[in-house]
Image: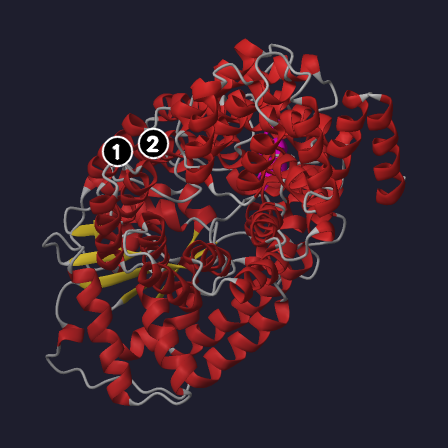
């Protein structure tokens, strides 16, 4: 029915004295078209007319008209003054008390509004409007339960009262009853689907429920009705990000900023997406802009800290986090992030302390419980790690990362309840690609434990496919990188062996090779020596080396020397006064030329392993690093391994005496003899402790952390054979 026909129908009902039917039609028009002046005036006129028949006292028509005119103009102070004048003579006028309540609400005087609406209800207990507005006043005071009760009464009196259904949804949301809120919002939309705010509210509730696809559909409807709805664009960006559609999210944030260029929250949130895409400098600029717009924006300060943390600029990260805590001392997420930074610095006790503070401020903080599990796992406290991870997934059954971490430290049985939870999560439509990827790896591990290798392989394949797509990896990038690295480094000449910072202690021991080749075990062996500090996977060589190699094009002797000096400065802080520091970043094999030219005294231990074992071990592992994109496709893995193999052949030809090639299989078969040869190459005095790497108490952050806490054993290189039936000829081209 058109607005014109609806207005005519309402007028016909008025002439017959069917005022409730007329009122319902006007309300329906105003629900669909809230700014329709004809319907507004008709409703006011109906108020005036019905005031003569409503319970209570009846002021003169001219006074009611004057009062409603003032109300329509939002002249709240004047309404209050006029109402009080009328009430002196007519103290039991329903309509005056009701309008006075609206005026107080307009002035944010919610307690006074509540009192006025309650008086109006006492006079006219059948007024759905009064109960609705009483609910609003109660809700605005934080009394959600009482508000819900009032809304329910209003709906009983008028079942198709769209605004009340909507407002009750908001109150239910305040109570945390998301399911009931969704139902209320849907009830409102069943009455009218022309109000953009109704669709937006439903989208908000669906987002909180994790139903992102449905939320997206609601937001699209919202923007169809009101294209300039800035909050809806903002919310759509959040939803798109949750669905893994980060580039689309950026477009939405940009639309928000076009309409509101000083929106600090939009700058911050856009920065979050750019950070997730690896655009750290751009993210920092947006965070800085957010802080400039809102100096006390703790979230933005926190996000600045996370960028610096990702860049391994830990001092800057801690400074940003400290500023966030100055603003919000109970900011649990910041305490958690400080814990992460301290963990990166190897300060495990301090990290645990900050994670505990995070949980203190936010007991159901699943991420903090997960991070406690990470530290415990790295320490070898597996039982306690399982408890921490289990608590994380208990709090948030949809927490994919915690499921994956828990799957790594436990052995699944067919009756394991976690297995079904993960399966349900995998089957859900309301899960991002990133989360589905992690669940795939967790389900693969579960099926592996249960001996269901065909199913495990299927999940490994799905998880790897998603991970590669998410990272946007192409092998052509590494082809060019390998060629550039070789071309540049083979033109380098070693620096003069003078007494420079680059030739003084500590002496670095680089343990390198393909990931999953056994480098962690080798570092455990070496760092169990009293003269050696285990540095773990240090990012410094690539951070400094790529800066010289990939940006300069041609590297001078001064550049090479500077690289060595800066690198040693970094590891000197880790040395604990010992003369040797290990760096077991596997990918450092790409920089052997630069390393040996800059630091002639450096020791290079190249760990070799059966190529098929390496390839399979990489394929079945989910790496947090975004720099290992080749691992998620079998053909890419094979080609990358061959690139690595050819480069190592070149390095061995150029530096025949400087690289110690250690065979992993030989090490596990003959641990003592191979370990003694290794210690001899490093020019260290023999210590029996090197034969007991499982007793090394240092924290281990690699995927091999559980394996290397056992006595050295042979046979691990044969695990890939369990999957040979599903691999076809994938490994035939391995060099």
- 159, 638: nearer the viewer: 159
What span is in magenta?
438-446
Q: Main secondary structure of the magenta part?
A: helix
> Is 442 one of the magenta-colored residues?
yes
Q: Against 292, is 269 above or below?
A: above
Q: Against 205, is 520 above or below?
A: below
Residue at image x 44%, y 42%? 703
Q: Against 480, is 267 above or below?
A: above
Residue 571 location in percent, x, y?
A: 21, 61
Identify the disc placed on residue 593.
Answer: none
For the C terminus, the image quarter is bottom right
Residue 332 falls in image quadrant:
top left
Q: Which of marks 1 and 2 is nearer the N terminus?
A: 1
Residue 60 location in percent, x, y?
A: 59, 26
Residue at image x 39%, y 51%? 519
Q: Name the residue under label 1.
A: 352
Q: Name the residue under label 2.
A: 372
- 510, 444: nearer the viewer: 444
The secondary element bearing badge 2 is classed as helix
């Amino acid at each position: 029915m058109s607005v014109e026909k609806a207005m005519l129908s309402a007028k016909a009902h008025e002439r017959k004295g069917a005022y409730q039917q007329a009122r319902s039609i006007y309300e329906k028009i105003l629900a669909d078209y809230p700014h329709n002046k004809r319907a507004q005036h008709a409703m006011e006129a109906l108020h005036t007319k019905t005031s003569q028949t409503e319970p209570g006292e009846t002021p003169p028509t001219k006074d009611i008209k004057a009062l409603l005119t003032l109300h329509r103009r939002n002249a709240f102070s004047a309404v209050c003054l006029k109402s009080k004048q009328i009430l002196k003579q007519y103290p039991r006028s329903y309509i005056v008390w009701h309008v006075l309540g609206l005026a107080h609400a307009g002035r944010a005087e919610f307690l006074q509004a509540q009192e006025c609406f309650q008086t109006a209800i006492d006079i006219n207990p059948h007024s759905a409007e009064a109960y609705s507005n009483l609910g609003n006043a109660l809700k605005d005071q934080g009394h959600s339960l009482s508000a819900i009760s009032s809304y329910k009464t209003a709906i009983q009196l008028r079942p198709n009262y769209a605004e009340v259904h909507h407002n009750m949804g908001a109150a239910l949301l305040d109570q945390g009853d998301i399911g009931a809120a969704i139902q209320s919002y849907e009830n409102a939309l069943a009455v009218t689907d022309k109000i953009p705010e109704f669709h937006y509210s439903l989208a908000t509730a669906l987002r909180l429920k994790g139903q992102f696809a449905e939320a997206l559909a609601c937001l699209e409807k919202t923007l169809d009705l009101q294209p300039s709805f800035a909050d809806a664009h903002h919310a759509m960006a959040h939803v798109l990000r949750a669905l893994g559609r980060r580039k689309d999210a950026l477009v939405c944030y940009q639309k928000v900023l076009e309409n509101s260029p000083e929106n600090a929250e939009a700058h911050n949130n856009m920065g979050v997406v750019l950070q997730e895409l690896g655009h750290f400098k751009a993210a920092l600029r947006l965070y800085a802009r957010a802080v400039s717009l809102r100096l006390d924006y703790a979230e933005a300060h926190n996000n600045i800290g996370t960028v610096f943390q990702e860049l391994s600029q830990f001092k800057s990260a801690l400074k940003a986090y400290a500023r966030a805590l100055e603003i919000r001392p109970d900011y649990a997420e910041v305490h958690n992030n400080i814990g992460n930074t301290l963990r990166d610095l190897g300060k495990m006790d301090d990290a645990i302390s900050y994670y505990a503070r995070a949980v203190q401020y936010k007991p159901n903080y699943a991420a903090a419980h997960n991070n406690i599990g990470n530290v415990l796992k790295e320490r070898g406290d597996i039982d306690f790690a399982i408890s921490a991870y289990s608590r994380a997934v208990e709090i948030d059954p949809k927490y994919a990362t915690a499921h994956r971490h828990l799957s790594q430290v436990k052995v699944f049985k067919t009756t394991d309840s976690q297995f079904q939870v993960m399966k349900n999560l995998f089957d859900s439509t309301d899960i991002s690609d990133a989360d589905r990827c992690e669940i795939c790896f967790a389900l693969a591990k579960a099926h592996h434990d249960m001996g269901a290798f065909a199913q495990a392989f299927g999940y490994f394949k799905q998880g790897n496919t998603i991970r590669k797509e998410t990272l946007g990896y192409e092998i052509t990038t590494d082809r060019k990188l390998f060629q550039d690295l070789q071309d540049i480094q083979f033109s380098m000449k070693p620096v003069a062996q003078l007494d420079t910072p680059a030739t003084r202690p500590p002496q670095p021991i680089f343990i390198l090779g393909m990931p999953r080749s056994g480098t962690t075990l080798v570092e455990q062996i070496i760092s169990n020596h009293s003269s050696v500090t285990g540095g773990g996977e240090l990012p410094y060589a690539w951070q400094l080396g790529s800066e010289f190699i990939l940006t300069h094009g041609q590297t001078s002797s001064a550049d090479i020397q500077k690289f060595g000096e800066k690198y040693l400065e970094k590891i000197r802080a880790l040395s604990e006064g010992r003369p040797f520091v290990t760096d077991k970043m596997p990918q450092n094999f790409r920089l052997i030329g630069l390393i040996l030219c800059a630091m002639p005294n450096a020791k290079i231990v190249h760990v070799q392993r059966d190529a098929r074992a390496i390839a399979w071990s990489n394929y079945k592992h989910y790496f947090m690093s975004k720099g290992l994109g080749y691992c998620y496709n079998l053909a890419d893995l094979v080609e990358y391994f061959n690139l690595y193999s050819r480069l190592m052949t070149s390095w061995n030809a150029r530096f025949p005496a400087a690289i110690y090639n250690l065979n992993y299989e030989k090490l596990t078969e003959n641990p003592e003899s191979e370990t003694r040869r290794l210690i001899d190459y490093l020019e260290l005095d023999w210590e029996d402790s090197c034969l007991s790497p499982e007793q090394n108490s240092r924290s281990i952050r690699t995927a091999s952390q559980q394996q290397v806490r056992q006595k050295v054993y042979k046979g691990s290189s044969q695990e890939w054979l369990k999957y040979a039936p599903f691999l076809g000829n994938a490994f035939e081209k391995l060099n």
